[in-house]
Image (cartoon, rainbow, N blue to C red):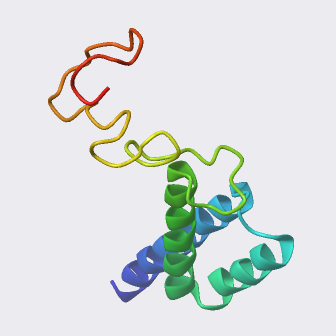
Amino acid sequence: MTTVVASVVLALVVLLNLVATVMLVRSDFETPLQKALQLALVWIVPCVGSIIVIAVLRGARYDHKLGFASDSVANADLPGTGPMSEGFGGHHGGHGEGWGDVGHGGDGGGGGH
């Protein structure tokens, strides 16, 4: 019975390490040195290292999708932020806040346009 439990735990640890390794190899956020150090962390400190690396990679991927990464090519703005939003009463301030889209015919219309 003890052997079966130990085998299952070992298999789960190896699986977790493999998932972290594959995620790390496929990522493009780290330098080669960072990847090597994280890979060493995964296999030297199995459970804790894997969980840390997976959490860091997921956080980096989430930040990259939102455009928070400093080296991001896309650098997408969140809705309501960026150069086109000038605050609530600005040029595009009425869009999406229940004002409706009146149109841009000469930009002299109502609703914050």
Is 36 situated left or right of 58 in this image?
right
Q: Residue furthest front?
A: 108
Q: Identify the residue at image location x=28%, y=16%.
A: 109
Q: Nearer the viewer, residue 35 or 29?
A: 29
Q: Residue furthest left?
A: 98
Q: Nearer the viewer, residue 8 or 106?
A: 106
Q: Nearer the viewer, residue 10 or 105?
A: 105
Q: Residue 79 appears at what percent x and percent y?
A: 39, 42
Is residue 16 among what the camera can see? Answer: no
Q: How many marks?
A: 0
In the picture, the quarter occupied by the N terminus is: bottom left
Q: Residue 38 appears at what percent x and percent y?
A: 69, 80
Is residue 57 among what the camera can see? Answer: yes
Q: Residue 34 appears at what percent x and percent y?
A: 77, 78
Q: Identify the residue at image location x=46%, y=72%.
A: 12
Please say if 107 is above or below 97.
Answer: above
Please say if 32 is above or below 101.
Answer: below
Q: Residue furthest top?
A: 105
Is 107 situated left or right of 18 in this image?
left
Q: Nearer the viewer, residue 94 or 42?
A: 94
In the picture, the quarter occupied by the C terminus is: top left
Q: Identify the residue at image location x=22%, y=21%.
A: 110
Please say if 69 is above or below 78.
Answer: below
Please say if 58 is above or below 100.
Answer: below
- Splitting the image into 4 quarters, where does residue 27 fall? bottom right
Q: Residue 104 appears at what percent x and percent y?
A: 38, 14
Q: Residue furthest right?
A: 32
